[in-house]
Amino acid sequence: MITYTKAIKGKKRAPGVIPLHGPEGFAGMRKAGNLTARALDMLAGHVRPGISTAELDRLAYEFACDHDAIPATIFYRGYRHSICTSINHVVCHGIPGNKILREGDIINIDLTLIHEGWHGDSSRMYAVGKISTRASRLIRITYESLARGIKAAVPGNTTGDIGAAIQQYAESQRASVVRDFVGHGLGTLFHDEPNIMHFGTPGSGPELKPGMIFTIEPMINLGRPHVKVLSDGWTAVTRDRSLSAQCEHSIGITEEGNEIFTLSPAGLFNPQEPGPQALKS
Ligand code: MF3
Ligand code: CO
Ligand code: CO
């Protein structure tokens, strides 16, 4: 157990220093990540035409309460909700409210649960009923981008190798990578070092070392990469209103490669490719 204040404040650290976590951190992340994945699995049973994003938010909050967890986004920089719900041309940080899901929408749900002091951060795409071929293709590209990023996340590579792998693949599919938001270290802190850009040059940035824990969370657009933030101060949308998708895992670098903490126990992480194989490294 951990007090709320301690959980949201975490520890302070010198800027530029990337923490290396031991077995205790990996064990904590495994539990928090698994809980987050189970919550996202639960939500899959509720995403359908007619449900509001506020209702999805309520379900996530209830799941957290029932499982000794706290959604990290509540009171985070003035944010008041348990999840972000980003529909169609919304890139990220969509705010739950009275918006009703409609047949053909694609929605990203992003959830971070704090459990025993550790942060499990993951997001995935959900299809609302039957979706267009374009939408389905974008989702497929986005998942493959994340998969390629995770493959590059091994000791001896650098953070730039992750970004380069993602960018090269996404652009080869004539899609674009959003530059304005990055992946991040996490652990007892929600956002820590290192920054993980989803674009870049091979070999640039800090070297990856066993014990590093961070997210990879590419946002991929069918149109141009540029985004703008709406007047609510949160909702980021594509400037050209093109369709956008995102998926996110929390991972840890190991001696052998990496461990994904937020794999879906139900095999539901990738809606295009359900099954237990969905994004194992
Ligand atoms: N979970 C998001 C991330 O991947 C952060 C959301 S911050 C919020 O880092 F305040 F918008 F919820
Ligand atoms: Co997230
Ligand atoms: Co994140």
Image (tube, grey):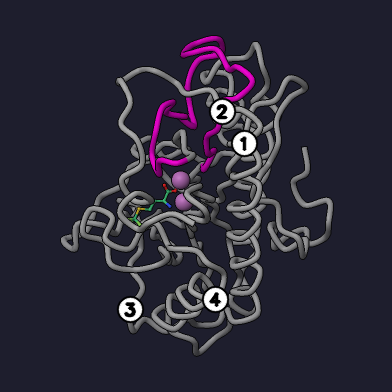
Q: Mark 3 packing: few (<14 Cα in 10 Å), some, or many (20+)?
A: some
Q: Which residue is mark 2?
A: 21
Residue 4 in view, yes or no: yes
Whole-percent x, y for residue 26 in the image: 63, 37
What is the three-letter code of the residue carrying label 4? Asp
Which SS class for mark 2? loop
| Sooner in the amino-acid sequence: mark 2 or mark 3 | 2
Which SS class for mark 1? helix
Q: Are marks 2 and 1 in contact (CB under 8 Å)?
A: yes
Q: Which residue is mark 4?
A: 66
Q: Mark 2 packing: few (<14 Cα in 10 Å), some, or many (20+)?
A: some
Q: Is residue 26 magenta?
A: no
Quarter in which the C terminus is drawn: top right
What is the three-letter code of the residue carrying label 1? Glu
Residue in the picture at 34% in, 68% down:
81
What is the three-letter code of the residue carrying label 3? Gly
